[in-house]
Image (tube, rainbow, N blue to C red):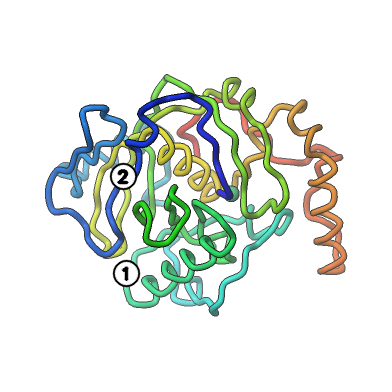
Amino acid sequence: MACATWLHSSPLTHTLLPFFYRRTTIPSSFRRFTSAGRFILTSNRVKHPLMAVQAQARRGFSFKEDEVASSADLYFEAPLKIVEYPDPILRAKNKRIDTFDDNLKKLVNEMFDIMYKTDGIGLSAPQVGINVQLMVFNPAGERGVGEEIVLVNPRVNKYAKKVVLFNEGCLSFPGIYADVESVIVTLQRPESVKIDARDITGARFVVNLSGLPARVFQHEFDHLQGILFFDRMTDEVIDSIRAELQALEKKYEDKTGVPSPESIDTCQRKKVAAGFGKS
Ligand SMILES: [Zn+2]
């Protein structure tokens, strides 16, 4: 995610930061933030893993069926580069990670590096050409400010019914900063989500995210499903950025010498219907 603007004039916004935990220091017990309740880390461990898996199954996730990433899948060369639309890497299936080694830590560090350098606040692994279920984010968007968040193999257990208004950008769509307010309302982008994931050490945890962290998470989680932010836009919003999307398609064709794998003009984009929790 390139950037985000909180459209609610909420006095609680500042309470969102700092939040979460640093990627090198996972809390061993409950951690709560303020009476505002904007962010609550309920536990760093799933006490009932079976229940969590069952919850995922009810929502349609194929948790056990996801292919596991090999060391070759996790190979990378630094410095990383941002993969831009319409590169098919952004639509490819992302494999589950089950190896939590130094290579993964180095990849995470490199992802934070490129995220900060490109003024991002969130980044998913496919956006740097690695098709695995990994995301990093720091809504403060600045090293040393806020908290750095790493989620491996994240799953959503519950979406809030309440929706919020937001602008979203995406590092894979340079130069496009879309007002997707109407889209969010239409598609009911939830204000909060309950997720479970693994941290950089492989430890499983459950967390409730709300406000800006929830927004960034949902954007990056879409990437892990091969969904791009314009998939959630109405045609009216698409029209407002059509020229920029076409320019990116032409840029890809000029660079690679092959036709763009998808075209906004032929409406071959992967339209996402209202509703969440589907992979
Ligand atoms: Zn993005």
Image side of residue 166 versus residue 271, left or right: left
Residue positioned 38% across, 30% down in the render: 192
Instruction: Describe the element under mark 2 as helix, strand or loop.
Output: strand
Q: Name the foreground residue: 157 vs 176.
A: 176
Residue at x 51% of width, y 28% of height: 189
Which element type, helix, strand or loop, lies under badge 1?
loop
Alpha carbon distance from label 1 to label 2: 17 Å
In the rendered image, residue 54, in percent from the top left (x then y), is placed at: 29, 37
Question: Which residue is situated farthest in the bottom direction here?
Answer: 77
Which residue appears at 61% of the width and 26% of the height? Answer: 181
Which amino acid lies under the numbered mark 2 shown in the image of this protein? Asp
- Residue 135 is left or right of residue 93, and the answer is left
Check the image and report above or below for 230 versus 104.
above
Camera-side residue of 78 and 263: 78
| Quarter occupied by residue 127 | bottom right
Circles 1 and 2, Cβ within 8 Å, touching? The answer is no
Image side of residue 25 versus residue 110, left or right? left
The crowd level at tag 2 (other Cα within 10 Å; few <14, some 14-19, many 20+) is many
The residue that mark 2 highlights is 196
Task: Locate residue 242 relative to residue 92 in the image: left or right.
Answer: right
Which amino acid is tagged 1?
Phe
> Whole-percent x and y of residue 136?
43, 56
**In the image, the residue with mark 1 has its CB under 8 Å from the nearest atom of ligand 1:** no
Residue 151 in view, yes or no: no
Mark 1: few/some/many CA within 10 Å (<14, 14-19, 20+): some
Can the viewer see residue 17 in this picture? yes
| Residue 61 percent across, percent down from the top left | 42, 41
Provide residue 163's location: percent of width, then percent of height. 47, 22
Residue at the disc numbered 1 = 100
Q: Quadrant of residue 264?
A: top right
